[in-house]
Image: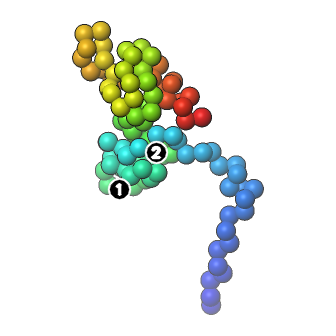
Amino acid sequence: MTQPRSAPMPAALRAGRPAPHPARTVRCPHCGAAEGARCTTISGRITKPQPCPARIAAHAIQTAVCSTCQVLQTYPCRNEHGLETPVHAARYTEAKGTAA
């Protein structure tokens, strides 16, 4: 008995899928997932559709200027003393705006 060949997914079904997260345009510093690939667990299993928090932060740093600390793209956020801090919420918002 031969197995039936699988048919390609109809365009109507494909159109209903949500777009991939914009953070997938950068390599994940946490799990090492390549650009465009979904994040994985340590054992290599693909995780939920949401990327690792470190990947979302890396995407914000690569794509957005921080309006809170006034640093340019590719530079980490700074506090009032010039020391590195976690990514500011305003930068995440700015990164979402550049992806849309």
Viewer-side label of 2, 1? 2
Residue 86 is left or right of residue 66, and the answer is left
Near mark 2 (Cα within 10 A), the count class, few <14, some 14-19 or many ≥20, is: some
Residue 80 is left or right of residue 18, and the answer is left
Residue 49 is left or right of residue 74, and the answer is right
The quadrant where residue 80 appears = top left
Q: Kindly report the distance in space between the C-alpha atoms of the residues bearing marks 2 and 1.
A: 19 Å
Q: Residue furthest bottom?
A: 1
Question: Which residue is labeled 1 in the image?
Answer: 44
Q: Residue at x 62, y 88 (%)?
A: 2
Question: Which residue is labeled 2 in the image?
Answer: 25
Q: Residue furthest top?
A: 80
Q: Height in image: 22 above or below 84?
A: below
Q: Position of residue 10 (x, y in %)?
A: 72, 62
Q: Tell me the quadrant of the picture where the N terminus can be found.
A: bottom right
Q: Residue at x 51, y 24 (%)?
A: 93
Which residue is more in the foreground, 69 or 56? 69
Q: Amino acid at mark 1?
A: Gly
Which residue is more in the foreground, 69 or 10? 69
Q: Residue at x 41, y 44 (%)?
A: 26
Residue 17 is left or right of residue 90, and the answer is right
Question: Judging from the image, what secondary structure is the residue with disc 1 in?
Answer: loop
Q: Position of residue 63 (x, y in %)?
A: 45, 33
Q: Tell me the quadrant of the picture where the C terminus can be found.
A: top right
Q: Height in image: 85 above or below 33?
A: above
Q: Position of residue 98 (x, y in %)?
A: 54, 31
